[in-house]
Image: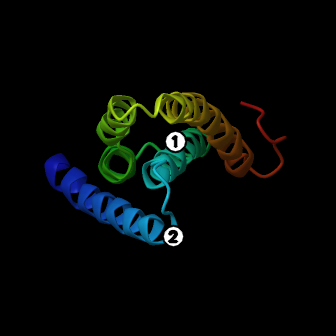
Amino acid sequence: MSFLIVGLFGMAGAVSRYLLGLWTTGMWVYIFPLGTLICNYLGCFSLGLLQQYLANRCITSSWLRLGLGTGFLGSFTTFSAFSVETVTLWNQEYYDIAIIYLILSAWGGLALVYAGSKAGDWLGAKKGEPHGSK
């Protein structure tokens, strides 16, 4: 059953990433891979938020965590595309853009997971509890 859950949610995440990529390609004509960065940023924030919110609300539904975390967000974000794009920029001698992309992806992703987890604390706090009391 878990394969089906991951597969269904994963299909939705992959299609979402594809559509976001098409949208950014139509708006963004520069060499910087903005579509992948946006997908990874959204995924980092969302996963931090999801994990913390579910933990604060004591929602332990394994199918929901598996479907949203591994399935949807796992297929929505893409480390492999980020890696290929970084190496491609480097090989095309866009060293400055490759380094900026690497730094923005790594540090931005970490910062957004942190921000998402703090948002999850705030949203998941039960009535009467101070926000982030856990």
Query: Which is more toward the observer, 98 or 49?
Result: 98
Q: Is residue 33 left or right of residue 4?
A: right
Q: Position of residue 16 (x, y in %)?
A: 36, 65
Q: Residues within 10 Å of mark 2 (few under 14, many from 20)?
A: few
Q: Which residue is mark 2?
A: 27
Residue drawn 33% across and 58% down?
13
Q: Residues within 10 Å of mark 1 (few under 14, many from 20)?
A: many
Q: Position of residue 79 (x, y in %)?
A: 35, 36
Q: Quadrant of the C terminus?
A: top right
Query: Which is more toward the observer, 129 or 33?
Result: 33
Residue drawn 35% across and 35% down?
92
Query: Which is more toward the observer, 120 or 106?
Result: 106
Q: Which of the numbered marks, if any, corresponds to residue 131?
A: none
Q: Position of residue 118 (x, y in %)?
A: 70, 38
Q: Which residue is mark 1?
A: 44
Give, as a three-letter code, the residue at label 2. Answer: Met
Assign a secondary structure to mark 2.
Answer: helix
Q: CA distance from mark 1 to mark 2?
A: 23 Å
Q: Earlier in the sequence, mark 1 or mark 2?
A: 2
